[in-house]
Amino acid sequence: MAFLTGSGASLRIGKEDAFGTAAEASTLVDITAESVSVSVEKGDEGSLLASKTPQTRDLLGVTVDGSFSFILRPEGAALMTHAALGGDEKHTENAGEGTHTHEFNLCGPAENLPSLTLLVDRKASVKKYAGVTVSAFTLECAAGDYVKGSVDIKGVKEEAGERSAGASTFTIPAYRCTSAVFKVGDEVFDISSATFKVDNALEDAPRTYGSGLYAGQPQHAQRSVTISFEIPYSGDVDAFRDRYLVSEENVSVRLLFTSSDREKQKYEIYMPHVSISSVDASVGGTGALTASVEGEALSVGSIEPLTIKITDTSSETV
């Protein structure tokens, strides 16, 4: 019996002008795995009339959810970041440098997150998912490795799609952590890994008479932006713990990583007010001691709790 492998599968995304109205999914994502699937709710009338098994299984609701994992690349990074954060893009041309800066913040509490169309090519079939909203966006940044991430999504329905004729390869190298910079306050921390996560805390749309089988647009609740990192244990870690863990003092955190062209391909995460919630520096064996630190970005006054800046050579906006 013939069978298929995952090699050659692809996933593309496109931003929708209106929720649930399918857009052209032309932006290729460098996926490493995907688990986007459709779920259905079926029920019967619950009649007391005797029968050996349930008499019917009527279709009552359809939902789409799942996730996909990827390698973060300059191509497509802006669209995925915008989909996760939701704020309007601030575009600046850097005169004389041949680069452009794309800046993103979290959208307001009363604003909707953008919606995407996903086109998943599983080789045997191509499926299109419209009305997709990002539930969570995570980046895993380990020293000496590529920047890897995952996106959790909620969607509306699954339809048959057509295989895209767009580019199937990338021309710009992926972001990596071989020369990354991690700053806490004004001090550079020589960390071994970091995990950054935006959780949009999506609330499902309520069922109404007019909603039919498919879900409406989910809304974000109060969002959570967290950072965790591991660092070789030293006296500096103890000083950091004494200053920030057992006090109400916040600290700024900045994470910068680049592609091979370090001056023209940058991805920078900045959180000006981070509350440190955990510093763990226990001894687990005879090997090198490491400490793990966790913190959460706070909204202080009118200062943006999170800013992501992408520097590249593209003048296109999302």
Image (cartoon, rainbow, N blue to C red):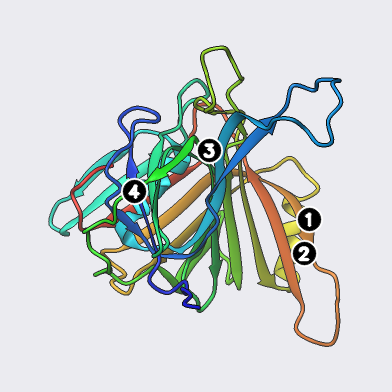
Q: Nearer the viewer, mark 4 or mark 1?
A: 4
Mark 2 element type = helix
The image position of residue 306, as x and y in percent, is 50, 42
Badge 2 vs badge 3, beta-carbon distance below 8 Å: no
The image position of residue 92, as x and y in percent, is 23, 44
Residue placed at 50% from the left, 55% from the top? 254
Local crowd size for mark 3, using a 10 Å CA cut-off: few (<14), some (14–19), many (≥20): many
Local crowd size for mark 1, using a 10 Å CA cut-off: few (<14), some (14–19), many (≥20): few
Residue placed at 39% from the left, 65% from the top? 123
280 over 197 or under it: above or below:
below
Residue placed at 47% from the left, 37% from the top? 157
Residue type pointed to by label 2 = Asp
Can the viewer see residue 82? Answer: no
Q: CA distance from mark 2 to mark 1?
A: 6 Å
Instruction: Give the residue pinned by disc 4.
Output: 161
Whichever of callouts 4 and 1 sits on the residue coming sooner in the sequence is 4
The image position of residue 89, as x and y in percent, is 32, 38
Can the viewer see residue 189? Answer: yes
For the residue pair 8 and 49, the one nearer the viewer reads as 49
Q: CA distance from mark 4 to mark 1?
A: 56 Å
Q: CA distance from mark 2 to mark 3?
A: 26 Å
Instruction: Give the residue pinned by disc 1.
Output: 242
For the residue pair 318 and 248, the one nearer the viewer reads as 318
Which corner quadrant of the image does residue 122 belong to? bottom left
Badge 2 vs badge 1, beta-carbon distance below 8 Å: yes
Q: CA distance from mark 3 to mark 1?
A: 24 Å
Mark 1 element type = helix
The image position of residue 180, as x and y in percent, is 46, 69
Relative placement, left or right, of 181 versus 91 is: right
The numbered dot on residue 238 is: 2
Whichever of callouts 2 and 3 sits on the residue coming sooner in the sequence is 2
Relative placement, left or right, of 202 versus 280 is: left
